[in-house]
Amino acid sequence: MATDLQPPKPASEDPYAPPKEVEQTSPSFLSRGLRQMRRGRTFFSTVFFAFGVVALQMAQGILLARLLGAEGRGEYATAVLYVQMLLYIGLFGGLEVICRYAADSRSQDDRRQFRLRRAAFRLGLVTGAGTTLFVMALNLLGLPASKQFLMPLAMLCALSLVGQHVMLIMTAVDRGSGHFKAYNWRKIFAAAAFPALLLASYLVWQVNLTIACVLFVIASLLSMATCLIGLPGVIRGEHAPPVGRLIKESRPYALSMLATDFFERMDLLLVMWMTPLVTQGYYAAMVPVAYPLTVIPNTLGLFLFNAGADSTKKLTKRDFHRILGLSLLVQAASVIPFVLLIGPLVRLVYGEAFGPAVIFAYWLAPVSALKGVLQGLDSYVKGRGRPLASILCRVVAAVIMAPAIIVALPSRLCS
């Protein structure tokens, strides 16, 4: 008689070893259909929440632009630049490693989930503290002479990294274990915290550059706090796997993230070094405007990562071509109305003072659309445990991109 029960694991087997190949009986047609319906609902609800996160990020960008003006927006962009650049690189692959552990079915019971969450909390503290120190050193040594007066605020903004790292790594437990409801609400709260604080401060008092930086740090701590709700024994409770082991296993992911994220944020670094504060403010204001073009493929990437981490499944070549073709079609259909509408919308929402920034939105639109597709597919490769596969492509792209921008950007600004 067929059974779905698996033979018991040997007592000596490591309960936190990476997932291994296991045999599964084929589900019935009805169970497959129900499972696909549940996955479809989960995917579309996650897309909905992802658009909500993007809407909040855009609201944050609009508030900063309106409250600080173009030059103040450029000053804020400088203060948070190295925080933005090192945020994901400094995770040192911890997000992906925690997500893979959470995707293992052996980590689904409450006791192991609690241990994994506590381990994620400790890992976030370690990576956050280390990245904070590194960002402070970059702020001390790596700001242009004309912008070094912003160093104290840049040092203040670096303190946000601990809260952001803990939030990102702990939500990876929800993501990997398939608890997308908790994952979605925590991400929404994290995205809403800073713009809500900005709006409240504006309504009851005022907002200037210093206040914005202080609220940025407070928002990161509030985001971290939401991930600790319902977790007993946060400080003294048992945690597993050990942080040292997680860091060791995360190194391949860290190298991949270094190549990927540095390439994707190199534009912010070059703009800071090569443009005045007003132009930097225009560019920084348009970056979140292009975020909606990355939502659908990035959300698909969450599910592709989990599918890749499941050793019992594997995408066929036909599956890959179908996903790639559909993603490109969706992105192409999104870019066209974006380019047609973005000019009037920017002038309406940001004000006529940000009219010169529209050109940056046009530049960012196709780049963001393609970036979303690449990130979605890259998530599957990382889920399969091959994070180094895309490094060469990113390095070559960075080598081409840097000199091209150095040559083209000044002439564009002067024309």
Image: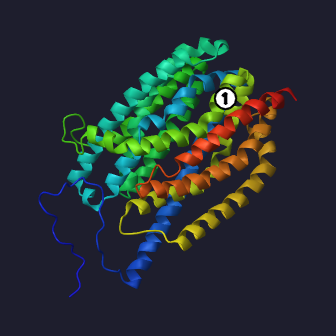
Tell me the amino acid under the disc marked 1: Leu
Report whether residue 162 is seen: yes
Q: Residue at x 26, y 51 (%)?
A: 113
Report whether residue 206 is seen: no
Local crowd at mark 1 within 10 Å, few (<14), some, or many (≥20)? Answer: some
* Nearest the eye: 296 or 56: 296
Q: Residue at x 34, y 32 (%)?
A: 125
Coordinates of residue 219 in the picture (x, y in percent): 47, 31
Q: Is residue 350 left or right of residue 115?
A: right
Q: Work out which quarter of the rendered image holds the C terminus and state it.
A: top right
Coordinates of residue 60 in the picture (x, y in percent): 60, 35
Residue 412, by quadrant, is top right
Q: Work out which quarter of the rendered image holds the N terminus and state it.
A: bottom left
Q: Is residue 78 above or below residue 107?
A: above
Q: Is residue 257 left or right of residue 279?
A: left
Q: Is residue 70 above or below residue 38?
A: above
Colour theme: rainbow
Coordinates of residue 143 in the picture (x, y in percent): 60, 18
Seen as rendered, the residue at the extreme right is 415
For disc 1, the marked residue is 270
